[in-house]
Amino acid sequence: MNGLDAKAFAALFRETCQKCFGHGISEPLSETESRQLSAQILDQTGLVVGAKSIKNYSSFIFKTPDSKEENPSVATMDTLARYVSGAPYTDEATRKNREGHFPYWFSFKEQFYRNAGQPPAPAKKRKYILVLIGLAVLAIAIIAFMLLRRNPSKPFIEEFKSTAEDTLADHGWTVQKKDDDFWQRRNEYPGNLTLFTLKGDNWPDSVSGIPGINNFLLRKINADCFSTEMRIEDFFPKQNWQQTGILLMEDSSFTGRSIRFSIIYNDFFGGFTLKPVVALQAITSQGTGSKPEEVTHQTIFELDSSQMNLISQNLKWSGLRIEKNGDHFRFLYSSGPIKNFAFKVAATHEFKIQPKFVGIFAISGLANDPAIVPVKIDYFNFTPDKCNE
């Protein structure tokens, strides 16, 4: 990055922080501020700039003793420029197809050069830039028109035939709080997405006060009524609070309302001596500052040492489904030795939420030193439905 481009990037980064925090910055961002800015960028643009990268950029701009030379990609700078300019929501696949020339960054840089008193681009180059900007405006108009029509999300099916990062991104997935050691193992069982029951939760722990789920896979949704489903192979949890499931959220930073539905292990009964169980758990949350509410805690199998092989066979395939019709939710599950075992209703519940994201996860809650086991996710779908009055 040449000197002027570095200055343009620094100006862009400062404007990004000004928009997010409502004031200019005079020192490098903290980890918490970096995570907040990363979440804001994702919410408003649909694109990802990692919190660690943001923190490194702020150190680079302020030239702290431990800072290193940074060379952000054009895609990253375009994402920041989109955020600053209030560009329409998109995703990596759409940007690649329609705006792979990164018009927002080049437009910002051109304006910065002009304001800095640099000579304008040659006439031929200016003409080319104007053509690109014109195409970008046309694409924005098309996207805005589609949004105004308020069409729901299209039906989506994911069978995880490939778990390559570019394939997942092209399919609309983003990954939060990437744990590189375990994320590298996501293709450990070919034909499945393999997640691991790492420590984490979607509400704050008592130490850091920060919620977080490692290797949390999520995607944007837009429908008032829908069903969403996942299918898991060979998941037999055997320690608190190993679990996997579906999470619906109003925002991607765990600050808004949410609903979680999962298969869990439980052997904690408030001092009573009972057999451990594999159970279904549905939990709602009103967001930051509120305590979660357990909607259902339904035993699937009571664990008996003489029946473990039989239970394992019946957990060969498990399925979870959430159906939303307005404020009415149904939670369904299936388990058995074959893939397409029939779903059963576990619970129904009324809850006011308009989720904008759906995610799939594997966690061990906030237990200390949890045993980490794989979760093989075979299938996911999201299907918008007509709302019944």
Image: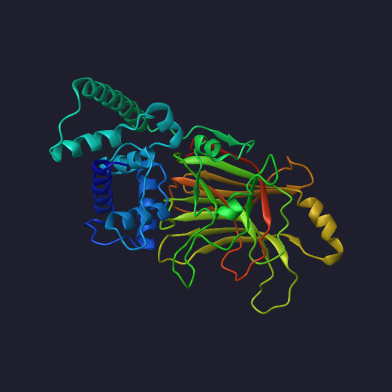
Q: Residue furthest bottom?
A: 271
Q: Quadrant of the N terminus?
A: top left
Percent across and percent down for residue 80 are 32, 44
Q: Quadrant of residue 373?
A: bottom right
Residue 177 in the figure: left or right of residue 256 = right
Q: Residue furthest left?
A: 117
Q: Is residue 348 visible?
A: no
Q: Position of residue 208 (x, y in %)?
A: 45, 69
Can residue 29 be seen? yes
In the foreground, 33 or 236? 33
Count the marks. 0
Image: 90 above or below 177: above
Q: Quadrant of residue 182?
A: bottom right
Residue 365, position as x, y percentages in the image: 58, 64
Residue shown at the point (19%, 37%) measured from the top left: 113
- The x, y position of residue 53, in whole percent, is 40, 52
User: At x 64% / y 77%, what residue is drawn?
Assistant: 270
Please determine whether, in this image, residue 235 is positioned above or below residue 133: below
Residue occupying image coordinates x 15% and y 41% = 116
- What's the coloring here? rainbow
